[in-house]
Amino acid sequence: MASYKLVNEKQGGRSIMGILKDKVGQPEPRAAIIDDACQVLDAEVASKSGLSGAAIKAAYGIVKNIKPGFIRDVIDSLLDEFVDAVEKVQQSAGPDVPAAQAVRDNPGPLADNLLSVTDQRAERAERPVIKKTYAKLRPSAKKQVESAVPRLAELIERHAG
């Protein structure tokens, strides 16, 4: 646990998650986090294989082509709630566990928290193609989010330090 304390030290009296929340609230750091999240999502989708991977890639292509910048806009609109979802996992892991490690150690609860956010958004979606695509992929979503945890943890480390 001692190594956790070093990584999770408060910087200037702020927790790592507090620092990340501050960055999300500022235009330039937020844009960098969104750009990085888009790259993480692209890499995660590209890494999928098999029949389920083909379905994910096809669905992602449909959603991505709705309008230029659509994925970026969606990430931007979900980012604050996603940070809150990560913070819940970190808090339940304990004060000496840094957020990225808490995410790595708790992929199931993290997936549940993130999917709760996307479920609520999908319910309010105005475009039928979004609702239909989400409904098709939702049954396997938890497994897919859990497999993305290593990249998500790296994103947190890059931006919360």
Image (spheres, rainbow, N blue to C red):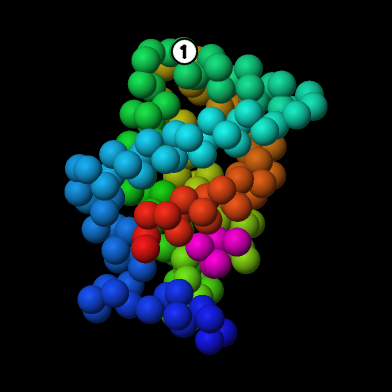
Can the viewer see residue 101 in this picture? yes
**Horizontal side of residue 40 vs 28, given as left or right:** right
Residue 125 drawn above or below residue 7: above
Return the x and y of residue 95 as percentages of the image width and height: 44, 80
Q: Which residue is mark 1?
A: 65
Residue 37 drawn above or below residue 126: below
**Horizontal side of residue 110 vs 117, given as left or right:** right
What is the quadrant of the N terminus in the image?
Answer: bottom right
Name the dominant secondary structure of the magenta segment.
Answer: helix
- Residue shown at 69%/37% (left/top)? 140
Return the x and y of residue 33 as percentages of the image width and height: 36, 44
Return the x and y of residue 126 as percentages of the image width and height: 38, 20
Q: Amino acid at mark 1?
A: Asn
**How many residues crowd around disc 1 within 10 Å: few (fewer than 14), some, or many (20 or more)?**
few
> Which stretch is magenta?
100-104
Return the x and y of residue 83 as percentages of the image width and height: 38, 54
- Front residue of this view, candidates 93 and 122: 93
